[in-house]
Image (tube, rainbow, N blue to C red):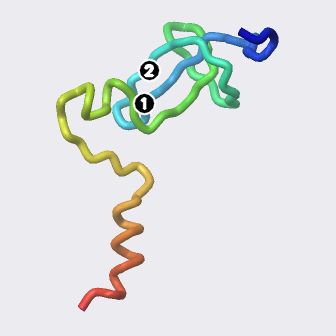
Amino acid sequence: MRKGIHPQNYRVVAFKDMSNDDVFLTKSTADTNETIEVDGVEYPLIKMEISRTSHPYYTGKSKLVDTAGRIDKFKNKYSKFKK
Protein backbone atom coordinates (compact mmCIF):
# COMPACT_ATOMS: atom_id res chain seq x y z
CA MET A 1 0.00 0.00 0.00
CA ARG A 2 1.14 3.53 -0.69
CA LYS A 3 2.05 5.60 2.33
CA GLY A 4 0.48 8.98 3.12
CA ILE A 5 -2.75 8.64 1.13
CA HIS A 6 -5.13 7.86 3.99
CA PRO A 7 -6.63 10.61 6.20
CA GLN A 8 -5.41 10.86 9.78
CA ASN A 9 -8.20 13.01 11.25
CA TYR A 10 -10.68 10.28 12.24
CA ARG A 11 -13.04 11.24 15.06
CA VAL A 12 -16.31 9.95 16.48
CA VAL A 13 -19.27 11.39 14.55
CA ALA A 14 -23.04 11.01 15.05
CA PHE A 15 -25.02 10.00 11.96
CA LYS A 16 -28.77 10.75 12.12
CA ASP A 17 -31.37 9.11 9.88
CA MET A 18 -33.85 11.94 9.17
CA SER A 19 -36.69 9.58 8.20
CA ASN A 20 -36.92 7.88 11.62
CA ASP A 21 -34.59 9.94 13.89
CA ASP A 22 -32.25 7.00 14.57
CA VAL A 23 -28.77 8.14 15.67
CA PHE A 24 -25.62 6.02 15.65
CA LEU A 25 -21.98 6.82 16.38
CA THR A 26 -18.99 5.80 14.29
CA LYS A 27 -15.61 7.15 13.27
CA SER A 28 -15.45 9.42 10.23
CA THR A 29 -13.43 12.17 8.57
CA ALA A 30 -16.52 13.93 7.14
CA ASP A 31 -16.70 17.69 7.77
CA THR A 32 -19.77 19.27 9.32
CA ASN A 33 -20.75 22.43 11.18
CA GLU A 34 -23.67 20.89 13.09
CA THR A 35 -23.47 19.10 16.44
CA ILE A 36 -25.75 16.88 18.49
CA GLU A 37 -25.70 15.77 22.11
CA VAL A 38 -25.83 12.00 22.67
CA ASP A 39 -25.74 10.66 26.24
CA GLY A 40 -24.44 13.99 27.54
CA VAL A 41 -21.55 14.21 25.05
CA GLU A 42 -21.54 16.57 22.05
CA TYR A 43 -20.58 15.07 18.67
CA PRO A 44 -20.37 16.43 15.10
CA LEU A 45 -23.61 15.59 13.23
CA ILE A 46 -24.06 14.16 9.73
CA LYS A 47 -27.68 13.97 8.50
CA MET A 48 -28.76 11.12 6.20
CA GLU A 49 -31.97 10.50 4.28
CA ILE A 50 -31.84 6.72 4.70
CA SER A 51 -29.85 4.22 6.77
CA ARG A 52 -29.90 0.57 7.79
CA THR A 53 -32.86 1.23 10.12
CA SER A 54 -35.09 2.68 7.38
CA HIS A 55 -33.92 1.03 4.14
CA PRO A 56 -36.50 -1.48 2.80
CA TYR A 57 -33.80 -4.08 2.08
CA TYR A 58 -32.82 -4.29 5.76
CA THR A 59 -36.23 -3.70 7.34
CA GLY A 60 -38.27 -5.93 5.02
CA LYS A 61 -40.90 -3.19 4.69
CA SER A 62 -41.58 -1.08 1.64
CA LYS A 63 -41.82 2.54 2.66
CA LEU A 64 -41.99 5.72 0.60
CA VAL A 65 -39.60 8.39 1.86
CA ASP A 66 -40.27 11.73 0.18
CA THR A 67 -38.42 14.32 2.26
CA ALA A 68 -37.68 16.70 -0.58
CA GLY A 69 -41.17 16.75 -2.14
CA ARG A 70 -39.91 15.13 -5.34
CA ILE A 71 -43.24 13.54 -6.21
CA ASP A 72 -45.13 16.83 -5.85
CA LYS A 73 -42.51 18.64 -7.93
CA PHE A 74 -42.86 16.03 -10.67
CA LYS A 75 -46.66 16.22 -10.65
CA ASN A 76 -46.64 20.03 -10.78
CA LYS A 77 -44.08 20.10 -13.58
CA TYR A 78 -46.00 17.70 -15.82
CA SER A 79 -49.58 18.61 -14.89
CA LYS A 80 -49.79 21.03 -17.84
CA PHE A 81 -49.51 18.06 -20.22
CA LYS A 82 -52.59 16.38 -18.76
CA LYS A 83 -55.42 15.83 -21.20
Locate residue 2: give its quadrant.
top right
Question: As shown in the figure, which amino acid type bears the numbered disc 2?
Answer: Val
To which residue does mark 1 refer?
17
Residue 75 located left or right of residue 12: left
What quarter of the picture does the C terminus occupy?
A: bottom left
Q: Secondary structure at mark 1?
A: strand
The vertical placement of 75 against 17, above or below, is: below
Circle 2: is it few (<14), some (14-19), or many (20+) Cα within 10 Å?
Answer: some
The vertical placement of 79 against 37, above or below, is: below
Q: Secondary structure at mark 2?
A: strand
Relative image position of residue 61 (x, y in whole percent): 18, 34
Residue 26 located left or right of residue 55: right
Locate residue 50: give its quadrant.
top left
Locate residue 14: give its quadrant.
top right
The vertical placement of 68 against 2, above or below, is: below
Q: Residue at x 43, y 35 (%)?
A: 18
Question: As shown in the figure, which amino acid type bears the numbered disc 1?
Answer: Asp
To which residue does mark 2 refer?
23
Q: Residue furthest left?
A: 61
